[in-house]
Image (cartoon, rainbow, N blue to C red):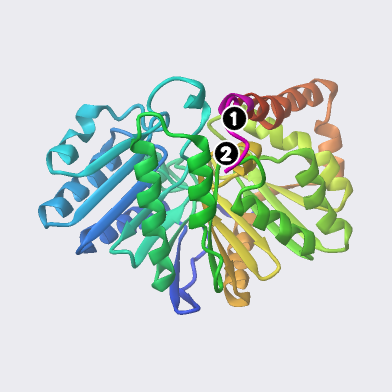
Amino acid sequence: MHATTPPTVEEPITVAGNRLTLLADGPDRLEALIALIEGAKESLRVLYYIWEDDDTGRRVRDALVAALGRGVCVSLLVDGFGAANATEAFFQPLIDAKCRFCRFAPRFGRRYLLRNHQKLALADERRVIIGGFNIADEYFGTIESGAWRDLGLLVEGESVSCLAPYFDDLFSWASKPDPRIRQLRRILSRRSHTDGALHWLFGGPTRRLSPWARAVRRDLRAARRLDLVAAYFAPGPALLRRSGNVARRRGEVRLITAAKSDNGATVSAARHTYWLLLKRGVRIFEYQPTKMHTKLFVLDDVVHIGSANFDMRSLYLNLEMMLRIEDPGFAGAMRRFVDGEVAQSVEITLDTHSRQRTLFNRLRWGFAYFLLAIADYRISHRLNFRNEPLAG
């Protein structure tokens, strides 16, 4: 493992007329987010899973209040579970300034197990910041301070405009007293945008594969080269085999997972999958300097970046937003980013994993995988689809 200085992020790249700027470092992400809010002239649509009542949370909130004072129309949707620590009193200055505000599924009940895991800040229907980070101090600090290692992307261009009607439909659905899952499925399908080099894909509680999950499965089937940076890695058995088969077809596969996390079960669940993948020729690395929260998937000339982890909850249950970019130049840049993350990781080989694979660890890892990849998914799926019509 090399020094813990993060790799230098490349200059913005233009794809099909859209300017893409990678935001790899926490302080840069925060300044880019504040600049986007301060530069908005007409509208801001903001959606986050976690929003904390801390210095960062207050700074972003106050920037939105200031935007409202300039006459900008601001809509804010936060998750009822993820933003539970930010009380109504915290958001009251926004509400008083006439912000359109809503919590996603804030009530208890069978839909409480759903999460609106998406993250976006959309300005004037022309500029958006997406990624895996939330609004809290620990997502915008430095590696040296122990903050999350995460990733954001600023997208500027015509492609971004499709996010406004999606956000508006989702906001309207979440504002209803008793929203139906069938209606949500229609929004996810109808608003996914698959024209051109940039595909905006949404995931959620669908009976079949969501638009994003379908795209990942299709890209995996044809891939000869695969780089995954997955903070939470616990796919189901079928998708796990499909990932390993890329290497089995004499392709090259690199997987970077977290060595440190806020939830030890997620690390254990990922380690449960290593044996099968290593035997198929996958190279596995565990990121060392700090907790990892990155979600980045590069398959040949295709990049998937956004809010989704590579686990059952993100693939089949949580509301997720992923941008699929098909461009050799951008894929090359993202692989160079992955190279930098590999340099700060420890490689897990068959030999080292065999030594770690004691009976106790196998039981511990297997139990964590069962909880996250099987039990949580099945319980949540049954609760949320019970009594829902099949059509839709």
Q: Secondary structure at mark 2?
A: loop
Mark 1 and mark 2: Cα distance apart in space: 8 Å
Q: Which sits in the foreground, 242 or 42?
A: 42
Q: Which sits in the foreground, 392 or 295?
A: 392
Task: Identify whether 52 is placed above or below 193.
Answer: above
Q: Quadrant of the C terminus?
A: top right
Q: Secondary structure at mark 1?
A: helix
Mark 1: few, some, or many residues within 10 Å (few <14, many ≥20)? some
Q: Position of residue 247 (x, y in %)?
A: 83, 57
Q: Which residue is mark 2?
A: 205
Q: Position of residue 104 (x, y in %)?
A: 39, 35
Residue 391 on the magenta segment: yes
Q: Nearer the viewer, mark 1 or mark 2?
A: 1
Q: Position of residue 303 (x, y in %)?
A: 61, 64
Mark 2: few, some, or many residues within 10 Å (few <14, many ≥20)? many
Q: Which residue is mark 1?
A: 385
x 80%, y 51%: residue: 242
Q: Which residues are magenta?
A: 382-392
Disc 1 + disc 2, Cβ < 8 Å: yes
Residue 374 in sight in this render = yes
Q: Main secondary structure of the magenta part?
A: loop
Residue 46 on the magenta segment: no
x 85%, y 42%: residue: 276
280 on left or right of 16: right
